[in-house]
Amino acid sequence: MSEEEALRRFGRMISRVVSGARLSREEAAEAYRQVILNEQPELQQGAFLAAHQARGPTTEEFSGAWDALDAYDTAKIHPQIEGPVGDIVGTGSDSLKTVNASTPAALIAAGCGLPVAKKGARLVTGVSGASDIFERLGVDLEAPLERAEACLEAHGIGYLPGEAFLRAGWARLIQRMRFTSAFNFIGPLAMPCARTSHVVIGAYSPRLCDQLVAILREIGMPAALAPFGRAEGEDPQLGMDEISPCGPTRLVLLKSGWIDTFEVTPADFGLRTRSLGEVASSKRAGDNAQRILATLEGRYDTPEADFFAMNAAALLWLADQAPNLARATDQAKEALATGRALDKLDALRRVQGVEGAVA
């Protein structure tokens, strides 16, 4: 196909999207492949992404976009381990800013015996993303992914920074665009570990939770849980992309191809409700890292410890490591009290890390 014909064909596809036509999963995958690989002029890329976002991508189209990201822009590890492998991540952009919970939750769940291939990135909104925290805890974000694979195989924990596994396409687009596109949604769904089977992925709105789980079902994820947490006394439209210790949490569950939606409270985890101020984010990433480290080192009877434990419990329960959320929380608290969660951080520091104290 000539360059001119490729331009015209892509242009016709843009016109279809503008007119409201839906793309098949295969058509969406091909369109996003061309964007990811920079095969179209930036003017055409921007026109397509804006038109698609304005019309609103369907679940099938999101899945096609994910197919392209997975095939052409996601570096992968293939650890030789058996059984379920978990991941826990927040998508960001939530309105209730809390200390990062998915990072310590991953360490706690791993301390309970569930292998966890934790992915993350630097902050998009708020104070600290997973990469900001892990960097301050001594993990080398520039370490080759093979070290994450080795750590996961040997110690049941590995950290996969988006900076390492998402290649040039996604990074180029996210850094240059100043509007929301499908890439903002599919980035957190990237699967750098080929063995990941159970995912907790929080989102900033109930609608996005529904979409994320629908996409995960479409792409074949065996089990997933999408929380939208609220805080008592706050506007119910405001929330956090994690299980909330401050009020009810709406959960969207995917298991065996079925999707269910229900609500839980801290009492379901065997915990009392905490105030938002007790788990609110500090102003500096280093301070958040210190709070996480203090919890791992023994301060396990605190609001932060409850917050981290209940999010770990959600992943443990999803992966059938406990019969209910309360029992899973007990396991998580025991992993903190016995130092097994801290052992996982020490393993990360040895295999993926650089020597140094929390900054």
Image (cartoon, rainbow, N blue to C red):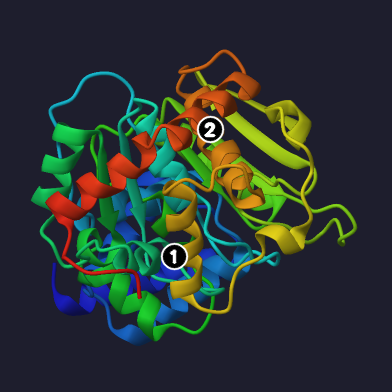
User: Eyeballing the image, is 32 above or below 80?
Assistant: below
How many badges with numbers are in the image? 2
Mark linked to residue 40: none
Residue 165, quarter of picture: bottom left
For label 2, the crowd category at 10 Å Cα-Cα, with few meaning under 14, some 14 to 19 and many 20 or more, is: many
Q: What residue sits right under mark 1 in the picture? A: 289
The image shows residue 309 at horizontal and vertical percentages of 55, 38
Q: Amino acid at mark 2?
A: Lys
x, y (%) of residue 265? 77, 35
Q: Position of residue 76 (x, y in %)?
A: 18, 47
Q: Which residue occupies 45% across, 65% down?
A: 290
Q: Which residue is mark 2?
A: 333
At a point 19% along the width and 65% down the height, the residue shown is 140
* 306 to the left or right of 6: right
For the N terminus, give its image quadrant. bottom left
Q: Amino acid at mark 1?
A: Ala
Q: Residue at x 23, y 37 (%)?
A: 194
Q: Residue furthest front?
A: 298
- Point 52% across, 16% down: residue: 322
Residue 349: image x %, image y %?
21, 54
Q: Quadrant of residue 245?
A: top right
Asked whether, in this view, residue 222 is left or right of residue 313, the answer is left
**185 displayed left or right of 45:** right
* C-alpha distance separating marks 2 and 1: 19 Å
Mark closest to the chain's N terminus, 2 or 1: 1
Closer-to-camera residue (150/228): 150
Question: Does the rendering let one see residue 224?
Answer: no
Q: Are marks 2 and 1 in contact (CB under 8 Å)?
A: no
